[in-house]
Amino acid sequence: PGLLALELLPEGAPRQLTLPVESAAALAEVIAEDLARLLPGVAELGLAIAAALYDSAQVLRPGWPLFAALARLHARAPGASDGPTISCFGAAAGRMADAVLEPEAGLIGSPLLLLPWTLIGSADQASAVGAEMEARFTETGLAAARTALFLNEAFSIHIEQARFLTHLDLCALASMQYQHADLAGLWALVECALLSPQADESCSSPAGDIYRWQGGVLGRQSGPASAESLAAAEERRRYRAILAAHGLPLRESP
């Protein structure tokens, strides 16, 4: 799984979050050119692209639903069974081909927006190219000027920088952001759900509540030091909203 990360200028908020199917082929062309430049041998793999922009929270959800939806749609696309093909899925009559791919406009607000794509191939091919992505994107992952220009015009945005990332790069970026916001414990829960869903993870909030990911379920239990105060209630609302944005409903216990 990969992403084209778009850092927007302050005046660069998008007027639309999806591209019509008529523009999808042009988007596929510029992204495929960039990937061919960055990843030798990528032409041997299929490529599925979402012609839409998302907040990082919608990408960082258990089971990676955006990438799973792209893989499903690509498998049903004409010619997919005949060899490596490129599929780019835009909106028809304002709707994406799969409801999972609908961008959640209520999450948009960060200057970082993401355009997801995924490579389709055998496990061996995926492993080899995945290693190349991790090695190359850090140093040489900038998108071409042509790609940034196309995206500026297509989405009516103003890009400061466009860079290719892996899904693990995005996790690392999110980790830093959550640490900066004093939410490192909360990120540990999200990361566990993303990367090690069978594992257990827990954290204590400043208000004393215990949040625990266990058995694929996220729960909250009021800790002994938890105070029934306005501050504690506000913290719970904030935590609940963040977790919901990551597709993690919370089971709460007294």
Image (spheres, rainbow, N blue to C red):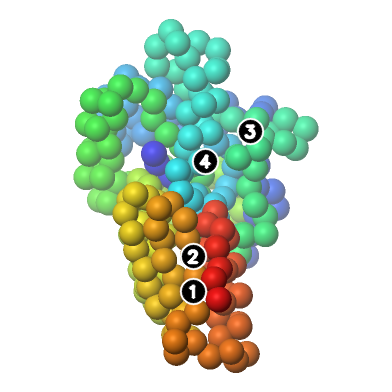
Q: Amino acid at mark 2?
A: Gly
Identify the image quadrant of the C terminus.
Answer: bottom right
**Residue type (three-letter) at the residue carrying disc 1:** Gln
- Asked if the residue under mark 3 is in contact with the one under mark 2, i.e. CB atoms within 8 Å, the reply is no
Q: Residue 236: x and y, percent?
A: 57, 77
Image mark for residue 221 = 1
Q: Earlier in the sequence, mark 2 or mark 4?
A: 4
| Element under disc 2 | strand
Q: First in sequence: mark 3 or mark 4? A: 4
Along the line of sight, which residue is nearer the eye, 31 or 133?
Answer: 133
Q: Secondary structure at mark 4?
A: helix
Q: Is residue 239 above or below residue 231?
A: above
The local crowd at label 3, few if under 14, some if 14 to 19, many if 20 or more residues have their Cα within 10 Å, is some
Q: Which residue is mark 4?
A: 66
Q: Which residue is mark 2?
A: 219
Considering every residue shown, the one lying at the far top of the view is 82
